[in-house]
Structure formats: C-alpha cells, structure tokens
Image (cartoon, coloured by chain):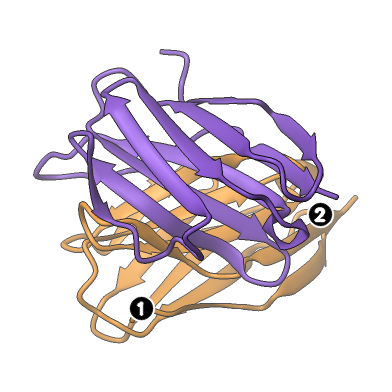
Amino acid sequence: DAGVIQSPRHEVTEMGQEVTLRCKPISGHNSLFWYRQTMMRGLELLIYFNNNVPIDDSGMPEDRFSAKMPNASFSTLKIQPSEPRDSAVYFCASSFRRTLSYEQYFGPGTRLTVT
Amino acid sequence: KQEVTQIPAALSVPEGENLVLNCSFTDSAIYNLQWFRQDPGKGLTSLLLIQSSQREQTSGRLNASLDKSSGRSTLYIAASQPGDSATYLCAAGGGADGLTFGKGTHLIIQP
C-alpha cells in the first residue's frame, strides 16, 4: 500500500487567501484524522471522521477551518481566509476501526506558510 | 481532558548507551499508547503500539512498557546508535478517538 497520501507537501500563501489541504487515507481504513503541529503547541487533533462522518471537530480552532470527507478515499481541510498564525504542519492519519487495534498511520504532512 | 507529558524534553548521550524515555498521562482510561519517531522536517513513523491490556511491546532494540494504573509508559532503547537521533513522541489513544500527544523528547546520539 502507498500509505497515507497528502497534497500539497508545501504551500505558501498570502494572508486572506483560501487554502485547501488534501488527504487520501490507506485503502480499507475507515477512520481519518487531521492534526496540526506547531512549535508552541506540539501536535493537536483538529477533527476526525469515522466511516466518512465527522465525529468530533472540537479541536478546530475557528470557523475559518472546515473539513469534509465526501467518500472513503478522500478528505479535505480548508482554511478560509488564512492568517499567518495558521502556519504549521498539517498531518492526516488513518486507522482501521476494529476490536483489537486502532493504530494510526500518518501521512508526510503539508507544511503551510501564510505570509 | 487527557494530558501527556514527556520527560526529558531533550537528551544527548554517547553512542552505545542504553536509555529510557518517559511518558506520563493523566487519564488512565486509555485504549492504547503509541510511540512515534519524527525526523527533522519529516512525518511520524510508528514505532510501537501497546494495547491497554498489554504490559509491553518489543521491536528490535526498542522496548515499550505500559503501566495504566500509574499513568506511565517508558521507551527503552538498547545500544543506541547515531541513527537513533530524532524526536520521540508518545501518544495516548482513546480507541476510535484521536490521539493526545506529548511534546516529545529530542534525542541526540553522539558518535
């Protein structure tokens, strides 16, 4: 399997612009997670989906952030409008919900810089 | 709310030493605990996952233990090598929920 795929790997944008990050989970996995990593706060969970349904979005920092999962093989995280404080590395992870293990597998991340 | 703490924040040791990284969590009602490695500018690589019913897991020179009742986990690295230099992250899992991460231990192995 190719693992979790994220695109783009790097994104540089100006304040006020819309940013869309994309994620393709591992085939067969039915849970998907979006995390953000900053120097100050470390890794934080933003939102997660089970079977394409958003379960908990309490980690989404503001209404400017939104996430969708239209099907089992694709998810997006959108920031509109973007601000410099949104600069961070955004990770997507997936897992297979079963009785014994919920091991999460991470993508390579998208490094976002908002100027 | 779960909180995860890792001690020490940074560690530098000569090659060949055995070392222990510590992780503590405030809510013992975890489903599993996962240790990751992160190299500079890279993603997370899963090293070991311990289910709540387990006490330890081993992979090569790595051994992770879990004591749920005391809210602690340790990662033991035997015979350290320069290639082990990285940041090691501990994460407490709530089952189908997301992971709560510690801030990590930045490890440097001196040749």
Pick the quarter of the image with the N terminus of chain B. bottom left
The structure residue drawn at horizontal position 38% and vertical position 59%, both measured from the top left corner, is B99
- Do badges 2 and 1 share one subunit? yes
Q: Residue furthest top?
A: A1
- Mark yes or no: residue A105 visible: no
The answer to which of B110 and A35 lies nearer the viewer is A35
Residue B41 point in image, percent of width and height: 76, 42
- Mark yes or no: residue A80 visible: yes
The structure residue drawn at horizontal position 31% and vertical position 86%, both measured from the top left corner, is B70
Q: Which residue is mark 1?
A: B2
Residue A46 sits in which quadrant?
bottom left
Q: Nearer the viewer, mark 2 or mark 1?
A: 1
State the CA–CA distance, disc 2 to disc 1.
Answer: 35 Å
The structure residue drawn at horizontal position 26% and vertical position 23%, both measured from the top left corner, is A72
* Chain with colour purple in the figure: A
The chain carrying label 2 is B
The answer to which of A45 and A52 lies nearer the viewer is A52
* Chain with colour orange in the figure: B
Q: Is residue B67 above or below residue A103?
A: below
Q: Circle 1 sits in a helix, a strand or a loop, which is it?
A: loop
Residue B93 sits in which quadrant?
bottom left
Q: Circle 2 sits in a helix, a strand or a loop, which is it?
A: loop
As shown in the figure, which amino acid type bears the numbered disc 2? Glu
Q: Is residue B105 above or below residue B95?
A: below
